[in-house]
């Protein structure tokens, strides 16, 4: 046993030693490139919006349809209920940002979205509607203040970022559902 540990330790040390020059070379090459300018206010919001949207779409498309109604316990939301909630709540950004009340007072029901194809299309539409709105508002529109249900007005940028966080929290729950089913979510797979 001890001999095996020594051999494993030496192999690990050799691997680190041979990988270190390659890592340093990559770091040096990256350091020679000029840093990119910071994103504009709307560009930053759009990048974050699209990032969580991409993750939600990927997980919606990836999970086998026979796992959509999985619940870790009877009191929990199903996978698909979590997904529909994360996507549908994006209208709590897009609608107030347009001066409207959110048109989805409740999450769409499973009776409305019966198939995987319908659910994936719904998630994609929610994400796209938000991205389109952010683009249309531009940088100046990010500081516009809207009524979003709280006691004070909210800047559009802050509202979008709050919804990004909300969707990200639910995405994290979806990842746990994957792991409970001994599956690796798309973002965690080797590229």
Image (spheres, helix red, strand yellow):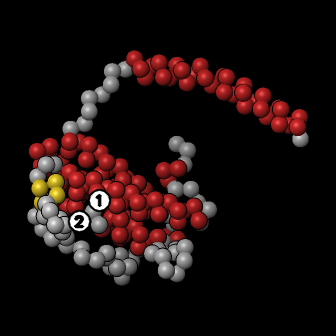
What is the count of numbered marks? 2
Q: Which residue is mark 1?
A: 163
Could you tell whether 12 is left or right of 70 in the image?
Answer: right
**Residue shown at the point (46%, 59%) measured from the top left:** 172
SS of the residue under disc 1: helix
Say which residue label 2 marks. Answer: 92
Closer to us: 58 or 85 = 85
Residue at the spot 83% in from the left edge and 37% down from the top edge: 5
Measuring from the top left, give residue 153's x and y in whole percent.
13, 60
Whether residue 57 is visible to the viewer of this picture, yes or no, is no
In the rendered image, the vertical position of residue 18 relative to residue 80, given as above or below: above
- Quadrant location of the N terminus in the rendered image: top right
Q: Alpha carbon of mark 2 to alpha carbon of mark 1: how far? A: 8 Å
x then y, percent, for residue 89? 29, 66
Residue 169 sits above or below residue 108 on the image: above
Q: For the residue carrying disc 1, how many other residues have a C-alpha within 10 Å: few (<14), some (14-19), or many (20+)?
A: many
**Dividing the picture into quarters, in which one does residue 36 lie?**
top left
Q: Which residue is located at x 31 percent, y 48 percent?
A: 48
Q: Residues within 10 Å of mark 2 (few under 14, many from 20)?
A: many
Assess whether mark 1 and mark 2 are in contact (beta carbons under 8 angstroms).
yes
Residue 42 visible in the displayed image: yes
Precedes in sequence: disc 2 or disc 1: 2
Relative vertical location of residue 26 with respect to residue 178 in this rendering, above or below: above
Residue 85 picture location, percent across and down:
35, 69
Residue 14 pos. (x, y %): 72, 25
Task: Judge left or right: residue 123 versus residue 178.
Answer: left
């Amino acid at each position: 046993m001890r001999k095996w540990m020594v051999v494993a330790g030496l192999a690990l040390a050799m691997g680190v030693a041979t990988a270190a020059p390659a890592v340093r070379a990559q770091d040096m090459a990256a350091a020679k490139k000029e840093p990119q300018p910071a994103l504009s206010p709307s560009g930053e919001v759009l990048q974050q919006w699209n990032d969580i949207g991409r993750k939600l779409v990927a997980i919606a498309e990836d999970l086998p349809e026979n796992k959509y109604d999985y619940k870790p316990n009877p009191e929990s939301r199903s996978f698909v209920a979590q997904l529909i909630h994360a996507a549908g709540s994006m209208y709590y950004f897009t609608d107030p940002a347009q001066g409207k009340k959110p048109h989805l007072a409740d999450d769409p029901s499973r009776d409305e979205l019966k198939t995987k194809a319908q659910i994936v299309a719904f998630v994609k539409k929610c994400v796209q509607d938000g991205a389109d709105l952010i683009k249309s508002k531009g940088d100046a529109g990010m500081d516009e203040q809207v009524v979003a249900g709280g006691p004070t007005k909210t800047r559009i940028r802050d509202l979008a970022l709050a919804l990004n966080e909300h969707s990200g929290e639910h995405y994290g729950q979806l990842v746990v559902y994957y792991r409970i089913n001994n599956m690796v979510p798309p973002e965690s797979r080797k590229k």
